[in-house]
Every structure is written in structure tokens, then in C-alpha cells.
Image (cartoon, rainbow, N blue to C red):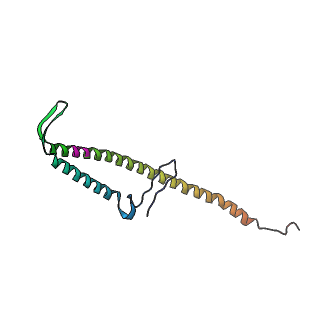
Amino acid sequence: MSQILLKPGHCQLSIVNCQLVFKKGVTQMQVYLVLALVFSIAVATFAVQNATKVDITLFFWQLKQISLVVVIFGSALLGAIAAGLFGAVKQLKAAKNLRSCKTEAESLSVEIDYLNRKLKKLEQPEKQEKQEKPDNACEGQ
């Protein structure tokens, strides 16, 4: 189980094996697929039950005597395309944010390594001084 957790105020990210997992191993994608299937069945049922011919007018554009099934499926398809485009934009923004967070984490890791090395160098003279000065408890006598 891999997790990336960064400090509050900076990039916040928590990933478990690169996917969101619900209880009992059901992934978010599986939930979306089931919901999409249920929605598709509902749209298909509604379209088949309303198979009459209709006239459509949109601004200066007119369609006469087109089947309502075609209108319903076309509307559902356009809605799915719009949702997909919005989802793609959101995914691209998340990928960009993840990339910047990884870059920030790497630079902070390099800085931590540098500071740890510097701390060790500063601690070494103290250890050498303690080794050079033996404890003479009996000197004052």
C-alpha cells in the first residue's frame, strides 16, 4: 500500500495503489460503469416508449418529422461527450498538480538530504572535542 502525504498548506495527495478503492475492493471505475449502464438502460427505455415524430427548431436550424428516439439518443450522446470533455480537463489539471507536487517533493527531499549532511558535519567537531577532552573527575583534588 503506497501513500504520498505532504504537509498541509502544500500539495495534499493520498494515493493507494494509484486508484481510489471502496469497501470490499470495488473501484471507483466499476461504480461509474454500473451507473452508466443503469442510465443507458433508462434512456433506451424512455426513448423506445416515446418513438413519435417531432419537429425540432433551434435558432435558425429546423428538423421536421424526426423520430424522438433519435433526439433522445442524440441529446444523451452530446451530454456524455460534454461530461467527458469536462472530465478530461479535470484529469489534465489533476495530472499537472500531481507533477508539480512530485517535483516539489523531490526538491524538498534533496534539501532534507543536504541539511542532514550539513548537520552531521556540524556534529562531528563536537564529538571530536569530547573525545580529545577526557573526563578527569579527580583533577580538582
What is the residue that sits farthest to the top in this orientation? 60
Q: Nearer the viewer, residue 106 or 48?
A: 48
Compared with 138, 53 (above or below) is: above
Numbered range of the magenta stretch: 75-79
* Quarter holding residue 81: top left
Instruction: Tell me where residue 21 appears, x and y as whole percent.
Output: 38, 60
What is the residue that sits farthest to the bottom in this orientation? 138
Residue in view at x 16 percent, y 45 percent? 50
Compared with 104, 131 (above or below) is: below
Instruction: Tell me where residue 80 appears, x and y as whole percent.
Output: 25, 47
Instruction: Tell me where residue 66 appears, x and y as whole percent.
Output: 12, 40
Residue in view at x 31 percent, y 55 percent? 32
- Classify residue 38 as left or right of residue 106: left
- Classify residue 44 as left or right of residue 3: left
Q: Nearer the viewer, residue 2 or 136?
A: 2
What is the residue that sits farthest to the front in this orientation? 49
Residue 107 is one of the magenta-drawn residues:
no
Mark count: 0
What is the residue that sits farthest to the right in this orientation? 141
Instruction: Give the quarter of the figure containing the N terminus.
Output: bottom left
Residue in view at x 27 percent, y 53 percent? 36
Instruction: Give the quarter of the figure containing the C terminus.
Output: bottom right
Instruction: Tell me where residue 74 appears, x and y as whole percent.
Output: 19, 44
* Quarter holding residue 52: top left
The chief SS type of the magenta part is helix
